[in-house]
Structure formats: structure tokens, C-alpha cells
Image (cartoon, helix red, strand yellow):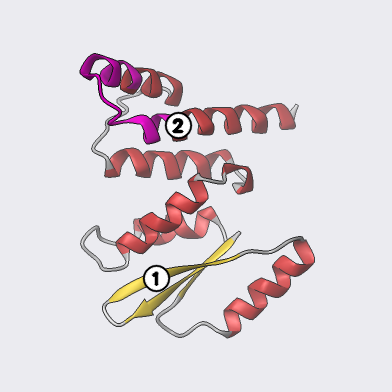
């Protein structure tokens, strides 16, 4: 799945560019590139999004659009191609939430956040725990595919 982040004055909006197969993906990508303004960004991979994130300050008006695009990608981890991209997206999410990993695995971090939620009788970390567990499952699938 690809996205276009379009500039709207001082703000940005995210438009999904969904394709059905690799031929239509190439056609959609080519079509999207021709309709891009100089101030627009084509996000055709998690890698491209992560590179743009690293180059963007948190107070930049583009940053919320990058976070929205990250949410779309995290909701469909099956479309992510490499473990590095999954780790990058997850660690970015954790950083935005002020959650330190401190050498813990993603599964250990999910367990720790779950324990915090249970102790506080809250659902503060429910979405993050879901994304962590989903990432662990996807990484495991990728590992099995390599065997």
C-alpha cells in the first residue's frame, strides 16, 4: 500500500493509494508520481516513511501526517517487507508515547505495559500492546518464511 502526503498550506493530509496486484501497484505508483506537487511526498514503503521521519523534526507540520501514515502501516503489518521496517515503526511508536524499551524485547515490553495497565486498572496502553503483539507475530512469520 502506498500513500501520498499532500501539502495543504501549512498542514498536510494523507491519501491512501491502494492497489490490487503488482501490475496495478506499478501503475498506481506511476500515476501517483505524475500527480505529485513539489511539496507532496509519495510514501511507497515503510522504509521511505522511516527515512522521512528521521529527517523531520517533531514540531514540523509534516510530523502529524507521518504519524498518521505510520498508523496505517501498523494496521497492516502483512504489507511490511522487512523486520527492520517493523522494528523501526514500533520503536518510533514507543518513542512518541514516551515508552523506553531499555533492551527489552517487544514481547517483554508488551508484557510490562500489560502489567502496568492491570495494576492501574486502565486501558492506557491497549493499542500499543496490540501493535507490539501484532509485530511479534509478524516477525515470527517472517522468520518462518526464511526457513
Q: Position of residue 72 (x, y in %)?
A: 49, 53
Q: Foreground: 81 or 68? A: 68
> Quadrant of the rendered structure where residue 108 is?
top left
Q: Is residue 43 left or right of residue 22?
A: left
Examine the rendering and report whether any part of residue 43 can be seen: no
Which residue is pictured at 39% across the width and 70% down the height?
13
Q: Is there a contact, CB below 8 Å, between mark 2 and mark 1?
A: no
Q: Is residue 123 left or right of residue 17?
A: left
- Check disc 1 and report the residue beneath it: 13
Q: In the picture shown, does residue 22 fall above or below 70? A: below
Q: Which mark is residue 82?
A: none
Q: Is residue 74 left or right of residue 99?
A: right
Report if residue 121 lies within the magenta region.
Answer: yes
Which residue is pictured at 64% across the width and 72% down the height?
29
> Quadrant of the rendered structure where residue 102 is?
top left
Report if residue 141 lies within the magenta region.
Answer: no
- Magenta stretch, residue numbers: 114-130
Q: Position of residue 80 (x, y in %)?
A: 59, 47
Q: In the picture shown, does residue 20 fall above or below 9? A: above
User: Which quarter of the figure is the N terminus placed in?
Assistant: bottom right
Examine the rendering and report whether any part of residue 138 can be seen: yes
Per the picture, the main secondary structure of the magenta-coloured stretch is helix
Looking at marks 2 and 1 on the same chain, the residue that comes earlier in the sequence is marked by 1
Secondary structure found at label 2: helix
Q: Which mark is residue 130?
A: 2
**Structural crowding at the residue carrying mark 2, measured as other residues with C-alpha within 10 Å and reported as few (<14), some (14–19) or many (≥20):** few
Which residue is pictured at 33% across the width and 38% down the height?
94
Distance, label 2 to label 1, CA atoms, is 26 Å
Secondary structure found at label 1: strand
Amino acid at each position: 500500500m502506498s500513500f501520498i502526503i499532500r501539502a495543504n498550506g501549512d498542514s498536510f493530509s494523507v491519501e491512501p493509494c491502494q492497489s490490487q496486484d503488482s501490475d496495478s501497484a506499478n501503475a498506481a505508483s506511476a500515476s501517483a508520481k505524475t500527480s505529485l506537487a513539489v511539496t507532496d511526498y509519495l510514501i511507497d514503503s515503510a522504509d521511505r516513511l522511516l527515512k522521512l521521519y528521521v529527517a523531520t523534526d517533531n514540531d514540523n507540520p509534516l510530523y502529524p501526517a507521518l504519524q498518521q501514515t505510520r498508523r496505517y502501516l501498523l494496521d497492516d503489518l502483512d504489507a511490511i517487507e522487512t523486520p527492520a521496517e517493523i522494528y523501526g515503526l514500533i520503536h518510533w511508536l514507543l518513542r512518541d508515547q514516551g515508552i523506553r524499551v531499555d533492551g527489552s524485547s517487544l514481547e517483554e515490553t508488551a508484557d510490562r505495559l500489560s502489567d502496568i495497565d492491570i495494576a492501574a486498572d486502565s486501558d492506557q496502553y491497549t493499542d500499543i500492546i496490540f501493535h507490539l503483539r501484532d509485530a511479534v507475530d509478524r516477525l515470527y512469520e517472517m522468520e518462518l518464511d526464511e526457513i
